[in-house]
Structures are given as structure tokens and as C-alpha cells.
Image (cartoon, rainbow, N blue to C red):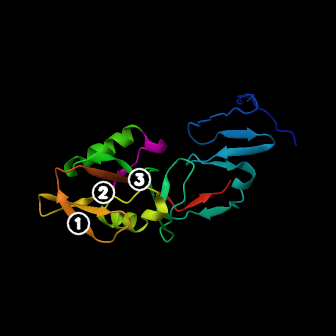
Amino acid sequence: MAIKTSPNDITVHVPEGKSLRVEFEGAGGQLYIGEQVYSVNESGLVLPANDQQGGSFAQRVLEVGQRLRDGTVVLSVDLDKDEALFVPAEIFGGRATFDKQNDVVAYVNKEALHGHKDWRRITDDEGDTLAHNWAKVTTKEPEWFWLASSSDGNFGRVRHGGYSGWDFNGRANSYPVPVVRRGLARNLDI
């Protein structure tokens, strides 16, 4: 099957063993790889053009602990909401005192950690999930980390990876700051 070219096409010959990075600026672009044609949808996903019409995409549900191509790790999956929660490969965005946790979030978003700029602080409930799923999402030794809530004004809540329950520690102490982002629980298996 010969693919017809158009005046809008840009042809690049990639030598064997080399990579090609393509970034589309909005929907409507097409990508040709060999005899296969892929289209860019409104979400920026590259989809097989022939399957896009019929909607017969093979979808796969993400699993807790799964490492994705962008380097993030799946922390939790909620199929009812079709949402997943992701942490960076290193779990934490950095270290800070309790009151400076937002500085860590601002830094990882500025640096586009793992290619994303929508990181945020972990909530107390998500911290509970991280503690319980610790062994599934990392091989790091369990350690204490900040939660979102303070305790009695002068303290911040902390959790320890792999253990249930929380504790509190002085707000001026420095602990790792977990950062998370949300995304879809199902992804296209292209």
C-alpha cells in the first residue's frame, strides 16, 4: 500500500539506530511510520488513523507500581472515575520544612519533572496510600515524609513508608516532600 504525500508533508530519513523526536502543536497532524498512518487527536494522543474512525482502541488498565515510559510510577487506580495517581520515579520532589513544601512543588513544575508541569503536594489520604503501597512503587528504604496537614499548630504530620498511622514532627525540620499528579487509569496500547 503506497501512502500518498501532500505538500504539507515533511519527510525525514532517520539513519539506522537513531531516534526521531516529533512534537505536534495541536490536533490534525499525521505521522507516517512505514506503511502505518497515525493521527494526532485533540488531546495530543497519536492514534492509528485507520482505528480512530471505528473507536476500536485496545485499552489497558494501569496497575499500582507500574512504571510508565515517562518515568512516573502508578500509585493508585480508581476505575470508577477512570483516574490514576502518579508519583515520580524517586517518589519525592525534594526536601523542605513543612511550611516550604510548596517551594518543592513549584521547582518540580518549573523543571517539568518527567515532562509534566501539573505536580502538587500529596494529601493526607494519598499519603496513606503511599505508605501502604510503598513496596509496590519503590525499592527505596522506607522513610518519613511530610503530609499536607499540620498538627497542633507547631507541628506537621508525617508518615513513614510501609507503615500505617501518622505521627507529627516540628515544622522547622526538613523531610522529603512527595509530589503527585493525576491522569487517566486506562491508556491506549498502541
Looking at numbered disc 3 in the image, what kind of residue is underneath it?
Answer: Ile
Q: Nearer the viewer, residue 82 or 144?
A: 144
Residue position marked by numbered label 2 in the rendering:
145
Q: Which residue extends farthest front?
A: 141
Q: Is residue 59 left or right of residue 103?
A: right
Considering the numbered disc 2 on the image, is that residue within a helix, a strand or a loop? strand
Question: Which residue is disc 1 drawn over?
Answer: 167
Does the image show residue 35?
Answer: yes
What is the C-alpha distance between the residues marked 3 and 1?
20 Å
> How dense is the environment of label 2, judged by Cα within 10 Å: few (below 14), some, or many (20 and up)?
many
- Which mark sits nearer the N-terminus, 2 or 1? 2
Counting from the top left corner in percent of width and height, residue 2 is at 86, 39
Name the residue carrying label 3: 91
The magenta segment is: 112-121
Q: Are marks 3 and 2 in contact (CB under 8 Å)?
A: yes
Kindly identify the amino acid type of the residue bearing the numbered disc 1: Asp
Q: Could you tell me the amino acid type at mark 2?
A: Phe
Are dots 3 and 1 in contact, CB under 8 Å? no
Q: Would you identify the image quadrant in which residue 34 lies? A: top right
